[in-house]
Image (cartoon, rainbow, N blue to C red):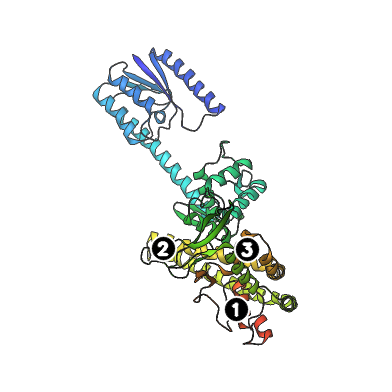
């Protein structure tokens, strides 16, 4: 009888031990064929698992049998031929039609009879049951690992898989690089290509040693694994691994990713200093700069810069006139000087801040306790949510959505507690630095560095400067009212304080009832 020898090598098992096992099987099969007086047409070694359909070598072997090139198959065992119902059915069907005369196995008996085919179908079914059972047990083990807070997958960049403890631990060297990537990206000056370049220069590559791509960089910046969460099965889970970055920094990175894919490119022509700072008081369009050249009859040439409205409004015709750059600079400098912090104010603020700094730790302890209670409340909600899902009160999609929301809130609270615990009294040094900056405004306003003035004016007045009637002023609707000390920034508060001079006592202007300690911004 002419036969085809068949040996299956499972996909993913190409170690030296497995290769030797295949060689041993082939040796045994050749000896078995000689004992049976069988002629081998060709030997096939399949590298794909018999569990799945679409094995090319297995399909080629059956096609050659259907064409009449051979009438039998020698294989080590039935599970080397098929571990799925379709391939097993094809083999049995070839026996039924007579195109396959017989199957020979050194460890299994199978004749082309009703009883032999019945035994063969049972062997195929048992092989399939073994594969399915193994898959279920593996998935159950993975689900249990997830419930314990361990991600059952490869660690992302910045972490390593610890084979001894079978957990994921922080890569001390790369984790610092990943944290720096987040810190630089939220500043808004890096594109995803720049992130990839930074990682390449820092020696961070993929597991195969390849350069991290733009897409991979985006995945890193949006991976919740770095804040102690991980996704598995389309669901967000709380991990036991150590976070690399704070929740606040991660949220800022997501906001930047959402806002734009690339930062604004620098224009080829360098703009004038005050462009992008002031808008038109009449039509609301931005103020731009225009270069003018005046040539006198005596040959002298004079260059001037005028700031004017771009006049791009489609609904209104703007009649505002232009303003010479020198006059623009004088008016902007005057506005900056008007907000400068007097020396006596700075000394009083610094004295009060030092006193308040000594007593602020007590309020931080109270806030920590409140946030810990909120975390306990979230833990109760998560338990109730799980019970509702198990009792089929809520569907799976609502369960996953609400769970992700609660876990995010919990991580935010944990980040706030960390910030309170480690940085409760860290506000004094930044406050003293700000006092120094506020006292230096006179110097900045008197300097000839126009771009420095623009940065300072932007920080103090934001987007509230308007040009109307050749006068630069703070928009009326945005100016602080007399006596108002509430403001979203320290500079706006200083503007409000200056506007309150003469209406309130200086002591109440400098230190409002709420005290000096700033509202806490958690990391």
- Badge number at residue 496: 1
Task: Count neighbours of disc 2 (C-alpha within 10 A) and say few if under 14, some if 14 to 19, many if 20 or more.
Answer: some
Q: What residue is shown at x 61% (from left), y 83% (from top)?
A: 500
Label 2 residue SS: helix
Label 1 residue SS: helix
Q: Is residue 255 left or right of residue 66?
A: right
Q: Is residue 511 visible?
A: no
State the residue lying farthest toward the left.
97
Q: What residue is shown at x 58% (from left), y 51% (from top)?
A: 299
Quadrant location of residue 69?
A: top left
Q: What residue is shown at x 67% (from left), y 73% (from top)?
A: 340
Task: Count neighbours of disc 1 (C-alpha within 10 A) and say few if under 14, some if 14 to 19, many if 20 or more.
Answer: many
Q: Earlier in the sequence, mark 2 or mark 1?
A: 2
What residue is disc 3 on?
453
Question: Which quarter shows the N terminus?
Answer: top left
Whether tag 2 and tag 3 are in contact, CB under 8 A, the answer is: no
In the rendered image, the vertical position of residue 287 relative to residue 69, given as above or below: below
**Looking at the picture, how far across and down is residue 269, in whole percent?**
53, 49
Q: What residue is shown at x 42% (from left), y 68% (from top)?
A: 319
């Amino acid at each position: 009888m002419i036969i085809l020898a068949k040996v299956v090598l499972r996909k993913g098992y190409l170690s030296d031990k497995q290769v030797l096992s295949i060689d041993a099987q082939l040796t045994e099969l050749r000896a078995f064929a000689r004992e049976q007086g069988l002629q081998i047409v060709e030997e096939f070694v399949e590298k794909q698992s018999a569990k799945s359909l679409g094995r090319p070598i297995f399909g080629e072997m059956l096609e050659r049998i259907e064409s009449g090139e051979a009438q039998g198959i020698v294989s080590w065992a039935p599970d080397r031929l098929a571990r799925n119902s379709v391939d097993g059915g094809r083999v049995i069907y070839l026996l039924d039609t007579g195109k396959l005369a017989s199957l020979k196995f050194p460890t299994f008996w199978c004749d082309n009879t009703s009883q032999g085919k019945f035994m063969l179908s049972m062997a195929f079914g048992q092989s399939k049951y073994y594969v399915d059972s193994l898959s279920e047990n593996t998935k159950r083990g993975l689900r249990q690992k997830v419930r314990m807070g361990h991600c059952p997958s490869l660690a992302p960049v910045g972490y390593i898989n610890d084979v001894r403890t079978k957990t994921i631990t922080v890569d001390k060297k790369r984790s610092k690089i990943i944290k720096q990537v987040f810190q630089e990206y939220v500043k808004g000056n890096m594109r995803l290509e720049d992130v990839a370049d930074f990682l390449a220069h820092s020696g961070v590559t993929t597991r195969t040693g390849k350069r991290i791509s733009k897409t991979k960089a985006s995945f890193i910046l949006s991976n919740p694994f770095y804040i102690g969460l991980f996704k598995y099965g389309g669901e967000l889970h709380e991990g036991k691994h150590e976070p690399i970055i704070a929740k606040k920094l991660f949220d800022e990175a997501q906001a930047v990713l959402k806002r734009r894919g690339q930062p604004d490119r620098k224009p080829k022509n360098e703009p004038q200093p005050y462009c992008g700072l002031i808008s038109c008081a009449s039509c609301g369009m931005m103020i731009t700069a225009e270069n003018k050249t005046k040539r006198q009859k005596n040959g002298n040439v004079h260059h001037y810069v005028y700031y004017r409205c771009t006049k791009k409004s489609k609904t209104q015709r703007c009649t505002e006139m232009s303003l010479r750059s020198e006059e623009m600079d004088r008016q902007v400098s005057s506005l900056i000087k008007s907000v400068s912090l007097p020396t006596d104010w700075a000394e009083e603020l610094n004295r009060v801040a030092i006193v308040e700094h000594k007593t602020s730790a007590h309020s931080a302890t109270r806030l920590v306790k409140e946030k810990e209670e909120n975390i306990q409340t979230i833990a109760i909600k998560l338990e109730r949510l799980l019970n509702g899902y198990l009792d089929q009160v809520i569907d799976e999609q609502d369960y996953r959505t609400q769970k992700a929301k609660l876990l995010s809130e919990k991580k935010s609270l944990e980040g706030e507690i960390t910030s309170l615990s480690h940085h409760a009294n860290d506000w004094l040094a930044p406050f003293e630095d700000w006092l120094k900056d506020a006292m230096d405004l006179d110097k900045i306003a008197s300097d000839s560095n126009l771009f420095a003035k623009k940065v300072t004016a932007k920080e103090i007045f934001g987007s509230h400067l308007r040009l109307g009637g050749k006068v630069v002023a703070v928009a009326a609707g945005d100016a602080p009212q007399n006596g108002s000390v509430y403001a979203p920034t320290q500079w706006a508060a200083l503007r409000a304080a200056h506007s309150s001079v003469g209406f309130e006592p200086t002591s109440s202007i400098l230190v409002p009832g709420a005290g000096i300690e700033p509202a806490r911004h958690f990391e």
